[in-house]
Amino acid sequence: MSEVVVGLVTGPDREQLVRLGRTLVDERLIACLNVVEGVTSVYRWDSALNEDSEALGILKTTSARVGAVERRIRELHPYDVPEILFLAVSAGSPPYLDWVSKEVAH
């Protein structure tokens, strides 16, 4: 069984991330995506300071699928350089971790 990982991806709005999540779940690359609205991102881009409203997607997948998830997000995402981060899960509810592993195709 592959280790479960949590991924973070920001996007311009809820609708974009929900579409992304539907695709990734349908393709069995992730078990689920939670969308958090109302995120404010402060960052530097092209030497300019920016502050934008965004949505944050929190996805659950396995370490075996990280590469495929990243590639698919890059294909579907509207940003030139989307935030795509993966974090190791050190512990969690065994039934939930099993569910994630079963939902994600290997």
Image (cartoon, rainbow, N blue to C red):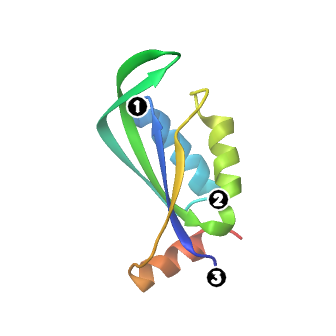
- In the picture of the structure, the residue carrying the numbered disc 3 is 1
Alpha carbon distance from label 1 to label 2: 23 Å
Q: Amino acid at mark 3?
A: Met
Residue at 55% across, 42% down: 20
- In the picture of the structure, the residue carrying the numbered disc 2 is 66
Q: Are marks 3 and 1 in contact (CB under 8 Å)?
A: no
Which secondary structure lies at badge 3?
loop
- In the picture of the structure, the residue carrying the numbered disc 1 is 13
Residue at 48% across, 34% down: 16
N-term-proximal mark, 3 vs 1: 3
Q: Are marks 1 and 2 in contact (CB under 8 Å)?
A: no
Please state, as top left, top right, bottom left or bottom right, where the C terminus lies in the image. bottom right
Residue 63, horizontal then vertical, whole percent: 62, 67
Q: Are marks 2 and 3 in contact (CB under 8 Å)?
A: no
N-term-proximal mark, 1 vs 2: 1
Residue 24, horizontal then vertical, whole percent: 60, 51
Nearer the camera: disc 3 or disc 1: 3
| In this picture, residue 67 sits left or right of residue 30 | right
Q: Amino acid at mark 1?
A: Asp
N-term-proximal mark, 2 vs 3: 3
Alpha carbon distance from label 3 to label 1: 34 Å
Residue 14, horizontal then vertical, whole percent: 39, 36
